[in-house]
Structures are given as structure tokens and as C-alpha cells.
Amino acid sequence: MGVIVLTGIGASIAEILLQNQENKLVVVARSEKPLIELQNKYGKDRVVYVAGDLSNESISEKIITTAIDSFGKIDSIIANAGVLNPVDKIANAKINEWKELFNINFFSIVQLVSNALPHLRSSKGNVVIVSSGASTKYYDAWGAYGSSKAAINHFAIQLAGEEKDVSIVSVAPGVVDTNMQNDIRDKCKY
Ligand SMILES: NC(=O)c1ccc[n+]([C@@H]2O[C@H](COP(=O)([O-])OP(=O)(O)OC[C@H]3O[C@@H](n4cnc5c(N)ncnc54)[C@H](OP(=O)(O)O)[C@@H]3O)[C@@H](O)[C@H]2O)c1
Ligand SMILES: *[C@@H]1O[C@H](CO)[C@@H](O)[C@H](O)[C@H]1NC(C)=O
């Protein structure tokens, strides 16, 4: 089984999945350290990693080839990577910052899932998208984040309609005490 996950909520997802001896993961994040630690804990036969920016096209392709070379198939993609910033009013929007957020929270998932589809079709696999309650609700100064999560929810609807052999679900995990929440607490002036 090849699964794509990251750290924070992703680290917990990985730990839970690795309790099942049959599961094997490709884990991805920009920081290499937590990826190495997970690999050391569970062994190279069950955990391989790609350290890099998911919004970089060559990293995205490398994730797919790493999964196939290591494990021979991909059963599931867990699209958990996400960022909150920029946190600011629309009146102060810096479009390049919005685009950078969309590159990570939206376009990187479109690309990864699209590239993985041939493998997901043959495994009758699934895609789990980690979305947010902010996709459907107003939160002060979270315009970029909420918009990207609303967009990825529609992507899930679209994929479900197009791909009969691939299951997809978009999940809003609720408040989870991770680095993202530390960041939110730091910005509570909003
Ligand atoms: N925590 C909550 O209360 C909450 C609520 C609703 C939804 N969510 C969603 O849950 C998901 C996980 O968030 P979290 O709370 O666990 O936050 P987190 O602790 O900040 O984790 C985010 C993870 O994404 C990775 N990441 C970010 N940008 C990346 C990039 N460009 N390329 C590769 N990896 C990247 C980070 O690793 P690196 O920085 O090393 O790249 C990190 O492992 C996000 O999609 C978030 O929107 C969280
Ligand atoms: C994307 O990743 C590749 C491989 O690590 C690297 O050579 C390239 O410089 C990266 N591109 C950008 C725009 O960062």
C-alpha cells in the first residue's frame, strides 16, 4: 500500500495507519527530520519519504514514482498538506501570497491526484482530502485559506463524478492542537 501523508495531523494519520502491519507509506513534507524519524521507527521496508515542496511539479512526480518503485501500487492518497497564511483582510490582500497558498492547498492536490489516477484506477483506490470547516463558514481574515478549502471540496465532487473506480472523501477534521493552531493563537489580534 502506498499512502501519501505529512506531519501534524498527518503524523498522527501515519502512526495510526502503521499500526496495521500491511500498510506501507510514502510520507512527504518540506522538513526532512520528522520523515527520517518516522522511517527509523518503522523501517525502510514500510516507510519511504520524499522531502520537498508538494507544489513543485518535479517533487509531485517523484512522489508517484517513489511509491510505485518502492511498493508497486498506490491504494490511497491522503492530501493533508496545508497552510493558513496569509491571514489578513481582503482589503489588504497581496495576490502573490494568495497564489502561493493556493499552490499548496489546491493546485498541488490537483496535480498529485491527477498524476496518480492511473494507479488509483487499477487499485480501485481512494483519495482522502483534509479540508476545513472554514470552507463553508466565515472566519475573520481567513479569506485565502477558506477559499482554497472550498475549491478543494468542489474538486472532490468533480473527481467523484468523473472516476467511478476511485473513491474520494473530503474531511473537515475540526480543531486539532497542531502548529497550525499555534499560528492561529499567535494571530488572535484578528
Ligand atoms: N489543526 C486544525 O485545527 C485544523 C483544522 C481544520 C483543518 N486542518 C487541516 O489539516 C491539515 C494539516 O494541518 P495541521 O493542523 O496538522 O498543520 P501543521 O502541523 O502545520 O501541518 C501541516 C503539514 O503540511 C506540511 N506542508 C505544508 N506545506 C507543504 C508543502 N508546500 N509541501 C509539503 N508539505 C507541506 C507541513 O510540513 P513542512 O512544513 O515540513 O512542509 C506539515 O507537515 C491542513 O490541510 C489543515 O488545513 C487543520
Ligand atoms: C523543484 O524540485 C527540484 C528537485 O528537487 C529542484 O531541482 C527544483 O529547483 C525545484 N524547483 C523550484 C521552482 O523550486
Image (cartoon, rainbow, N blue to C red):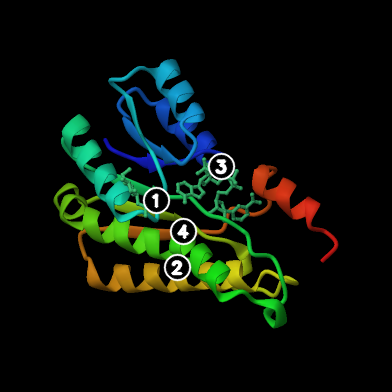
Which residue position is annotated with label 3?
Answer: 9
Give the spatial CA distance, label 2 vs label 3: 18 Å
Which residue position is annotated with label 4?
Answer: 104
Is residue 168 or residue 145 the one in the foreground? 145
Give the spatial CA distance, label 1 vs label 3: 17 Å
Asked which quadrant contains residue 17, the reply is top left
The disc labelled 2 sits on which kind of residue?
Ile
Asked if the residue at label 1 sits under 8 Å from ligand 1, the reply is: yes
Percent of width and height locating residue 82 = 52, 54
Is residue 119 or residue 44 the one in the foreground? 44
The disc labelled 3 sits on which kind of residue?
Ile
Q: Are marks 2 and 4 in contact (CB under 8 Å)?
A: no
Q: Nearer the viewer, mark 1 or mark 3?
A: 1
Q: Quadrant of the N terminus?
A: top left
The disc labelled 4 sits on which kind of residue?
Ile
Give the spatial CA distance, label 2 vs label 4: 11 Å
Q: Are marks 4 and 1 in contact (CB under 8 Å)?
A: yes
Q: Which mark is residue 152?
A: 2
